Image (tube, helix red, strand yellow):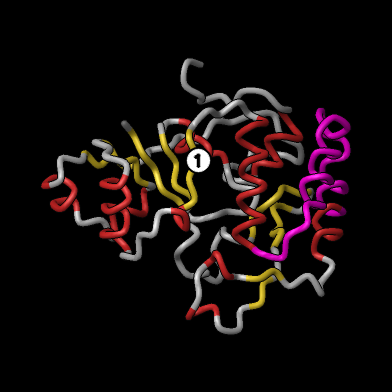
Amino acid sequence: MIISVHQPAYLPWLGYFEKISRSDVFVFLDTVQFEKNSYINRNKIKTPQGWQWLTIPVKVKGHTDSTLEDTEIDDTQPWRAKHLKSIEMNYRKAPFFSECFPKIERLLSLPTGNLAELCWQQLSFWIGEFGINTTMIRASQLNIDSCKSELVLDICKYFSVDHYLSGAMGRGYLVENDFSSAGIAVEYQNFIHPAYPQRWGDFEPYMAIVDYLMNCGSGKLPFLKGD
């Protein structure tokens, strides 16, 4: 059985979903600390001037002592309306805008002031939208309080898996000998980003999933099992 683990992400890129689709179980890592300038609360869309960030403002006071599960969104700022306006302005002539924009409007109207909860709600929508059948589990439900490589190993042991699919960044902190001793193979994701029809000049990879949705529509992603 294959398991993967990843922090919450706002409007994740295609590689996030490729890792989930290749796994039998995906653990949504909402028990770690918020990391500033990461993809947890922001992602990129393509515009005529290049890419731009869509960022969810968060209340960062005390975040070094709390987890993503406790990180609050700063809804005193009208970020939802701004994000919708940016998406509409830059994708209104995309092939699937009229079909998909109402879905984004509903997605951004879901009421929550918690960052991890918002990312979880959105991830649940995306995996349904693209027909991904992986079992999804929140780390906060597991009562595992270790950290870094040990945390990942303990999650693997919890589910009795024999294969851990890591992101490429895992090479920097995973203690592979510990996994080998536990009979768990470690594989590092080597995602080759597919090109797809896209507006505004040359193809730009690593955009938020909304870029793919507006240009290619709902349904199966190009790398799902069996495709």
**Residue farthest to the bottom, as pictured:** 61
Question: In the visual, does 165 lie left or right of 82?
Answer: left
Above or below residue 82? Residue 26 is above
Q: Is residue 77 left or right of residue 137?
A: right
Q: Is residue 24 magenta?
A: no
Residue segment shown in magenta: 85-114
Considering every residue shown, the one lying at the far top of the view is 226
**Residue 89 appears at what percent x and percent y?**
87, 48
- Horizontal and vertical percent for residue 218? 71, 27
Is the N terminus in the top left, top right, bottom left or bottom right quadrant?
top left
- x and y percent of residue 192 in the render? 45, 34
Q: Residue at x 54, y 66 (%)?
A: 68
- Residue occupied by mark 1: 136
* Relative horizontal placement of residue 141, taking residue 2 as reference (left or right): right
Which residue occupies the foreground of this view, 48 or 61?
61
Main secondary structure of the magenta stretch: helix
Magenta span has 88?
yes
Front residue of 154/99: it is 154
Q: Check disc 1 and report its element: helix, strand or loop.
A: strand
As shown in the figure, which amino acid type bears the numbered disc 1? Met
Quadrant of the rendered structure where residue 163 is? Answer: top left
Number of marks: 1
- Who's the residue at 45% across and 51% down the image? 6
Q: Please tell me which residue is depicted at 50% across the width and 70% down the height of the picture.
A: 67
Find residue 31 and report its horizontal and vertical position in percent: 46, 63
